[in-house]
């Protein structure tokens, strides 16, 4: 089953949105397989956002993402990478569709409440930054056959 890396960013933690955000992925039918409450080091942040290292917003991005704790999560499910990106909405919350997570809870691109991997390659890279193999919990969800045929 496909896996993705989702992260509740420091602004969402400060604003008390952890439960609300996790709730959406649970209700959708995705399965939580790993979770940590952590504060990123500068090194982790720079690795995570390495593809943006030469962008003008990089320094601010690293400062923001290390400014407080985050919830680091691995979720599993059918097409979870693409579908969770749709649920998050556009990177710029001003352009994010109403009802999406960013469309509902954010207004500023620098405070857009959630991260989600954008491809299988980035999911693999990002999961490896935050988790070791032993962190992934193998569990049987009894409602599975009511979620995926
Ligand atoms: P996403 O988080 O939707 O995958 P991204 O990978 O293009 O978006 O950028 C990573 C983060 O960097 C994004 O969540 C917010 C910040 N960011 C992107 N473009 C920005 C910009 N033009 N100005 C300020 N911050 C930006
Ligand atoms: Mg991205």
Image (cartoon, rainbow, N blue to C red):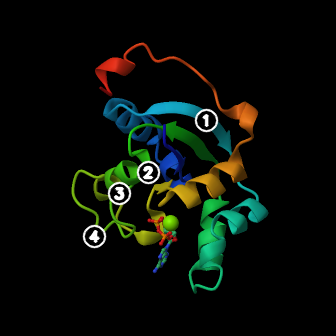
- Residue of label 1: 35
- The disc, 3 or 1, on the residue closer to the chain's N-terminal end is 1
| Quarter occupied by residue 67 | bottom right
Task: Give the x, y percent position of residue 145.
Answer: 34, 19
Which label sits on residue 102? Answer: 3
Q: From the viewer's perspective, is 120 left or right of 41?
A: left
- Label 4 secondary element: loop
The residue positioned farthest toward the top in the image shown:
142
- The disc, 4 or 3, on the residue closer to the chain's N-terminal end is 4
Asked if the residue under mark 2 is in contact with the one under mark 1, i.e. CB atoms within 8 Å, the reply is no
| Quarter occupied by residue 46 | bottom right
| Mark 2 and mark 3: Cα distance apart in space | 16 Å
Q: Nearer the viewer, mark 1 or mark 2?
A: 2
| Mark 4 and mark 1: Cα distance apart in space | 29 Å
Q: Nearer the viewer, mark 2 or mark 4?
A: 2
Q: Nearer the viewer, residue 31 or 36?
A: 31
Task: Give the x, y percent position of residue 45.
Answer: 69, 63
Q: From the viewer's perspective, is 59 left or right of 9?
A: right
Look at 47% across and 64% down and name the residue there: 111
- Can residue 39 be seen here? no
Q: Is residue 95 above or below residue 3?
A: below
Look at 65% across and 79% down and name the residue there: 53
- Residue of label 4: 95
| Mark 4 and mark 3: Cα distance apart in space | 9 Å
| Mark 3 and mark 1: Cα distance apart in space | 21 Å
- Residue of label 2: 81
- Label 1 secondary element: strand
């Amino acid at each position: 089953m496909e896996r993705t890396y989702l992260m509740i960013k420091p602004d969402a933690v400060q604003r008390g949105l952890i439960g609300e955000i996790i709730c959406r992925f649970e209700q959708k039918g995705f399965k939580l397989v790993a979770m940590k409450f952590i504060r990123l080091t500068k090194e982790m942040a720079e690795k995570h956002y390495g593809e943006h290292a030469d962008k003008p917003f990089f320094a601010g991005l690293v400062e923001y993402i290390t400014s407080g704790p985050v919830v680091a999560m691995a979720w599993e499910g059918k097409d979870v990478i693409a579908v969770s990106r749709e649920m998050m909405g556009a990177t710029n919350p001003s352009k994010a569709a109403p009802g999406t997570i960013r469309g509902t809870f954010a207004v500023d691109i620098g405070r857009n409440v959630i991260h989600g991997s954008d491809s299988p390659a980035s999911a693999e890279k990002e999961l490896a930054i935050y988790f070791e193999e032993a962190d992934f919990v193998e569990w049987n969800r009894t409602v599975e056959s009511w979620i995926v045929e």
